[in-house]
Image (tube, rainbow, N blue to C red):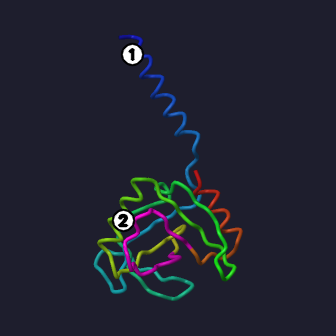
Amino acid sequence: MRALFAALALVLLSACASQAQRPPAAHQLGIYPARTASVDGWQAQTDRHSGVHLWLAPQAALTEADVQQADMILAPDGQPAIILTLGANGRAILASLTRSELGQPLAFVVDGELRLAPIISEPVLDGRVALTGFDSLAEAEALVRDWSR
């Protein structure tokens, strides 16, 4: 019995140690259901690039914690884009969210700022989304380093 408790304690300690080694993300990501008209209890935000006004749900459906991998690519126009691949739980949440919110915007908020809000035209089932609208290549690279695991 002692050996069982010792083994269990060792497993728990190693799990805690591996969590402690991963620093919290320096940059925050929130993916929110959004609307183009005011909704009680939802937060108004404006996209600084497009000037579009949206109302975001009170809670993010997904965060940087749901990101399994982040990769940077250059879009055809030469601007940086980040491809986010979500883990299994995040993939399921995104699929459900995009099924139920067809025709509505999906807001991507980075460090508290609305960056992108595409209209959902079809469910996203593969757990991959692309972010664009970065101020610089350095900004996109910093986010990729922070969100990659």
Most extreme residue toward the bottom, as rendered? 51
Picture quarter containing residue 69? bottom right
Q: Secondary structure at mark 1?
A: helix
Q: Residue 112 or 30: which is nearer the viewer?
A: 30
Q: Is residue 122 magenta?
A: yes
Q: Earlier in the sequence, mark 1 or mark 2?
A: 1
The overriding secondary structure of the stretch rendered in magenta is loop
- Residue 95: assigned label: 2
- Residue 69: assigned label: none
Residue visible at 34% across and 75% down? 42
Q: Is residue 55 magenta?
A: no
Q: Residues within 10 Å of mark 2 (few under 14, many from 20)?
A: some
Q: Which residue is mark 1?
A: 4
Q: Secondary structure at mark 2?
A: helix
Q: Residues within 10 Å of mark 1 (few under 14, many from 20)?
A: few
Quadrant for the N terminus, please: top left
Picture quarter containing residue 59? bottom left
Q: Position of residue 143 (x, y in %)?
A: 62, 63
The amino acid at mark 2 is Ala
Q: Position of residue 128 (x, y in %)?
A: 49, 65
The part of the chain drawn in magenta is 114-131
Residue visible at 51% across and 82% down? 47
Q: Position of residue 131 (x, y in %)?
A: 55, 72
Residue visible at 49% across and 34% down? 16
The amino acid at mark 1 is Leu
Q: Position of residue 127 (x, y in %)?
A: 45, 62
